[in-house]
Amino acid sequence: MKNKILIILPLCFLILFNGKKYEEAVKERLFLPIKLCLEGQDCGTVAQASQMSSTASVEIEKVQLSEGSEHEVKMLNTGDGGQMIFEPAVIKVSVGDTIHFKATDMSHNSASVEGMVPAGAEPWAGQLNQDISVTLDTEGVYVYQCDPHAMMAMIGVIQVGEAVNMDDIKQASQNYRSTLVMNSERIDNYLNQL
C-alpha cells in the first residue's frame, strides 16, 4: 500500500501541473503580458503596442514631492495597489518631515528594513495594530515593511530629500527579493518610481 501511494502522489502532481514545476505553473497562471516602457525609451504608438503580441504599454509614473511636513500612510489589507499594502506605497518628503503610519486595517505594523535605510538613520518598529509616527531627519531612501506580511511584499519606500543611498538600496533589494513569496516585483516597481 505504501508503494502505491508513493507512485500515485508524483503522478497526481504531474497531472495537475502538466509536468511543469509548481513554481512555473503558478507563474504561468499569474502572468500578465505587458510592455514596460521606461523613461526615454520609444514605446511606439498605441496601435503598434497593441500589435506586439497583445501587450500593453505601461509607463512608470515618478512620484512627486509631497506637500507639507506631515504625511499619512495607511496600512491596508486591500488598496489600489493590491492586497497587503501601504497606501501610498511610495512617497517623497523633505528632511525633518513626519510620517504617520495609520493602522487602518488590523494585524499590521510598520518597521524599517534592516540594511535598507540611510547610514546613520534611526530605525523604527511599530507595534501590531498600533499607529506610529516617525520623523525622518536623515536624507536618503528608506524601505519599510509590515513584519507579519513581509513575505507577501507588504512594503513601502520613502525618499527623504535626495536619494543619496539609492545604489546601496538597489543592491540590498536583490537579497531582500529572495525573502518574498509573492509580489516580489513590488520592490523594483516602487524604487523605479523615485
Image (tube, rainbow, N blue to C red):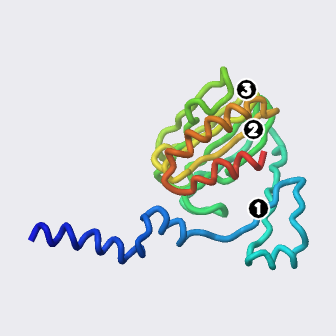
The answer for how far apart the CA atoms under marks 2 and 3 are is 11 Å
Tell which of 121 and 40 is nearer to you.
40
Mark 1 or mark 3, earlier in chain = 1
Please provide percent x and percent y for residue 64: 84, 48
117 lies left or right of 153: right
Q: Which residue is mark 2?
A: 159
Dot 2, crowdedness within 10 Å: few (<14), some or many (≥20)? many
The x and y percentages for residue 109 are 52, 44
Q: Amino acid at mark 2?
A: Gln
Q: In the structure shown, which secondary structural element does the residue marked by tag 3 occupy?
A: loop
Q: Residue at x 55, y 31 (%)?
A: 114
Question: Label 3: which residue?
Answer: 137
Type of residue at label 1?
A: Leu
- Give the residue number, with chain letter if any, for mark 1: 36
Residue that appears at 58% across and 51% down = 75
Q: Quadrant of residue 69?
A: top right
SS label for mark 2: strand
Give me the C-alpha separation between circle 1 and circle 3: 35 Å
Q: Position of residue 159 (x, y in %)?
A: 75, 38
Question: Mark 2 or 1 closer to N-term?
Answer: 1
In the image: residue 29, left or right of residue 42:
left
Q: Nearer the viewer, residue 119 or 30?
A: 30
Q: Identify the residue at the far top of this view.
A: 120
- Locate the C terminus and report the quarter of the image it occupies: top right
Please provide percent x and percent y for residue 104.
57, 54
User: Tag 3: residue type?
Assistant: Asp
